[in-house]
Amino acid sequence: MTEFERRVLAVVDELQPGQLVSYGWVASEAGKPRAARAVGNILGALSDDTRPWWRVVQANGRIVSPNAAEQRARLLEDGAILDGDRVLEPPVQRP
């Protein structure tokens, strides 16, 4: 695991229920603001369900995860309001 991957996972581990952030926000917090796609790849490869990967979406609120159905279900459990594959509430934190 690279240092950047460790930082990304540390940022994601701190996300709380009701907190929704963008891939770019995570990348910025992990020290590489232009690495949003890398964050998506890191989270898409996770096999650990104890990390709240489902709280990370596109900056426009779209859910694009390979596990979109599971992500939608978990976001609904967190209290999010969805319209199809887009989160309406809570607002997405962006860099």
Image (tube, grey):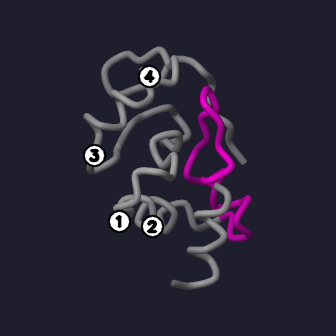
Secondary element at image label 2: helix
Residue type highlighted by circle 1: Ala
Secondary element at image label 1: loop
Q: Which residues are magenta?
A: 12-33
N-terminal label among 1 and 4: 1
From this view, report whether residue 72 is shown above or below residue 67.
above
The residue sitting at 73% across, 59% down in the picture is 29
The residue sitting at 55% across, 40% down in the picture is 59
The residue sitting at 61% across, 41% down in the picture is 21
Res. 45 mark = 1
Splitting the image into 4 quarters, where does residue 28 fall?
bottom right
N-terminal label among 4 and 2: 2
Residue type highlighted by circle 2: Ile
Q: Nearer the viewer, mark 3 or mark 4?
A: 4
Label 4 sits on residue: 77
Label 2 sits on residue: 42
From this view, report whether residue 77 is shown above or below residue 15.
above
Location of residue 73 in the rendering, given as x and y in whole percent from the top left corner:
34, 27
Location of residue 80 in the rendering, given as x and y in whole percent from the top left corner:
50, 19
The residue sitting at 40% across, 59% down in the picture is 48
N-terminal label among 3 and 4: 3
Label 3 sits on residue: 67
N-terminal label among 3 and 2: 2
